[in-house]
Image (cartoon, rainbow, N blue to C red):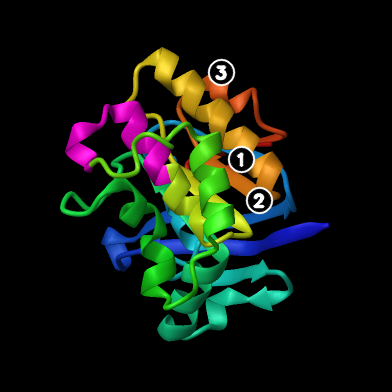
Amino acid sequence: MNILEIINLSKTYGKGENKVEAIKNINLSIEKGKFIAIIGASGSGKSTLLHCIAGLDNITSGEVIFEGQNISKLSEEELSRLRSRKFGFIFQSFNLIPVINVYDNIVLPINIDNKRVDKEYINSIIKVLGLSDKIKKFPNELSGGQQQRVAIARALANKPEIIFADEPTGNLDSSTTDEVINLLKECSLRFGQTLVMITHNNEIANMADKIVTIQDGSILN
């Protein structure tokens, strides 16, 4: 079963001589519960693609169908609600709030959405990610790998259908990278999420169920 369908997706910046086709007529199906790796050279359009299919950027033409709904037709308010309830995001920069502790960073998306915190579920995430003894610490008291674990826990906190990860290990050393990717895979399997990840790392890409290669705004495979 496909959770996401991208149909004839294009994204253009500028006009006339300044026109740049960042994404060109992309078609892609993403199956529920799978790990998809998006790879390509710097400037190939992979981050633009991720931002478009995750509702973070407007598309120029085409359709992005999530669970049967064309999200490219939603208002900004509807998109915001969809992102907060159905999507989880992990970026290269951890984007943790420095003045609140680890636990409050993790449950932040739930509190913003004024939802009740499922403490049993949150505690299970914290345990899987090895953060049980860190929940009262502040981000500046953690290593880079530990901060990325917190960012993963935060992305999982609202029980998303899809996790979008843009170079989530870009700031980590190789041993921590392996650890974080294995944790991400374990969490997505355990909690049933689909994982869509941009990476420059071929070893990480080879762990995915499907590899999508982007070159000059188009899919090669």
Q: Please state which of residues 217 and 182 is positioned toward the viewer in this rendering.
A: 182
- Left or right: where does residue 86 sit relative to residue 200? right
Q: What main secondary structure does the magenta stretch of the protein show?
A: helix
For discs 2 and 1, the disc positioned in front in the rendered view: 1
Q: Which residue is mark 2?
A: 193
Q: Is residue 206 magenta?
A: no
Residue that appears at 25% across and 31% down = 142
Q: Position of residue 101 (x, y in %)?
A: 26, 49
Label 3 vs 1, first from the N-terminus: 1
- Left or right: where does residue 131 sit relative to residue 16? right
Q: Position of residue 49 (x, y in %)?
A: 49, 53
- Amino acid marked by disc 2: Gln
Label 3 vs 2, first from the N-terminus: 2
- Amino acid marked by disc 1: Cys
> Magenta segment range?
138-151
Label 3 sits on a secondary structure element that is helix
Residue that appears at 44% across and 22% down = 177
Q: Is residue 146 magenta?
A: yes
- Amino acid marked by disc 3: Glu
Q: Please state which of residues 135 and 164 is positioned toward the viewer in this rendering.
A: 135
- On screen, residue 41 above or below 174: below
Number of numbered markers: 3
Q: Please state which of residues 174 and 39 is positioned toward the viewer in this rendering.
A: 174
Q: CA distance from mark 3 to mark 2?
A: 21 Å
Q: Quadrant of the N terminus?
A: bottom right
Q: Which residue is mark 3?
A: 203
Q: Is residue 167 visible?
A: no
Mark 3 Cα within 10 Å, few/some/many (few <14, many 20+)? few
Q: Position of residue 175 (x, y in %)?
A: 43, 13
